[in-house]
Image: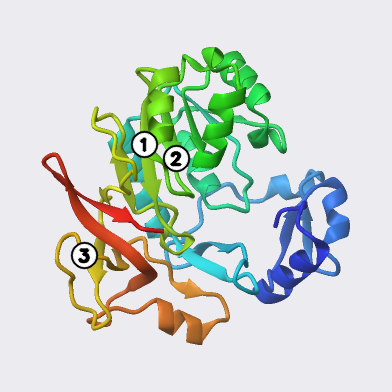
Amino acid sequence: LDPAYPLERIAYMLEDSAPVAVLAQGATRALLGDVAVVDLDQPTWQHHAVDNPQVAAVSAYVIYTSGSTGQPKGVINEHPGVVNRLLWMQDAYGLKADDTVLQKTPFSFDVSVWEFFWPLFIGARLVMARPGGHKDPAYLCEVIAAEQVTTLHFVPSMLDVFLAHGDVGQAAGLVRVMCSGEALPGSLVRRFKQQLPGIGLYNLYGPTEAAVDVTAWNCVRPDVPDNTPIGKSIANTRLYVLDSQLQPVPLGVVGELFIGGVQVARGYLNRPELTAERFSGPVHAAMYRTGPGAYCRRISSTWAATMTR
């Protein structure tokens, strides 16, 4: 629940999710109505057991989609999917104890999941940006330099603003930059390489319905395509590009992207009909259908998935 949300949206999310309790601080208590609250400003909750509970069979979290096509939908993600996502990211990008991750995505968006838990997962350092700081290129440059940040995330449109208006010389200590949430133009990749040479840039793709990201593409190669691929599937996930008959399309032909594997969410909260429609597959497997607009193409010696939307 983002305190910056309109009161109507907060009320809808509380009614839809029916939480047993809400963790809150300070003035945010007034936004929550009659729901039971654990006040984090009070010391009493600190006296509960610190042992890890057995939670594997319980959903990890519900994040609501933006609601751009109607009422927001609560997506129920599972612990194994989130853990798989974190284990893959560590295996792929090798965060170390002396790395620093900048957490700047509002926690109502799913990118924040790995921003919070990846550094804590392996003992690296976590720095939290000030509220709204993700929109301020000058502030981001300052905090990157002051906190010796090595790892952070941008949506491509914000990376564009950062490169155009930030003092990127202060960001020379970065090691890796992740992009997701929007199509990554090849022109932006070229600018990034010119302004921040030697820093890793990675294009990730995945819906909220599949524990944040399910594909990855390393932008290191010298041949920069105009439409950056979303790449290949990550560990323990599968991608299928299918036609209207749920049959694989030929390479290079546009079809609908289906996602399978451990990261597929349980479904939508209180939306059984929509869950049945979107979480389905050709053999009744646990799959999520993203909608039309994907194809596979060959880039040098590599086959990679590319989105057309």
Residue at 43% from the left image edge and 26% from the top image edge: 191
The percent coordinates of residue 40 (x first, y second) are 76, 47
The residue at which mark 3 appears reads as: 253
CA neighbours of label 1 inside 10 A, class few (<14), some (14 to 19), many (20+): many
Question: In which quadrant is the N terminus drawn?
Answer: bottom right
Quick check: marks 1 and 3 in contact, CB under 8 Å? no
Element class at badge 3: loop
* Tag of residue 202: 1
Q: Position of residue 237 (x, y in %)?
A: 27, 58
Q: Considering only vertical position in the picture, is 141 above or below 40?
A: above
Are the residues tagged 2 and 1 within 8 Å (C-beta)?
yes
Measured from the top left, where is residue 146 in percent x and y?
Answer: 61, 14
In the foreground, 268 or 56: 268
**Quarter that holds the C terminus:** bottom left
- Residue at 57% over, 20% down: 144
Q: Where residue 90 appears, x then y in whole percent? A: 34, 37
Q: Amino acid at mark 2?
A: Cys
Label 2 SS: strand
Q: Is residue 244 left or right of residue 249?
A: right
Is 20 located above or below residue 191 in the figure? below
Q: Which secondary structure, mark 1?
A: strand
Q: Amino acid at mark 3?
A: Val
Other residues around mark 3 within 10 Å, as few (<14) / some (14–19) / many (≥20): some
Between 177 and 197, the one lying in front of the other is 197
* Residue denoted by label 2: 179
Q: Report, in whole angstroms, how far the alpha carbon at label 1 lies from the one at label 3.
A: 25 Å
Q: Answer with mark 1 or mark 3, whichever residue precedes in sequence.
A: 1
Along the polypeptide, which appears first: circle 2 or circle 3? Answer: 2
Q: How many other residues sit within 10 Å of disc 2, few (<14), some (14-19) or many (≥20)?
A: many
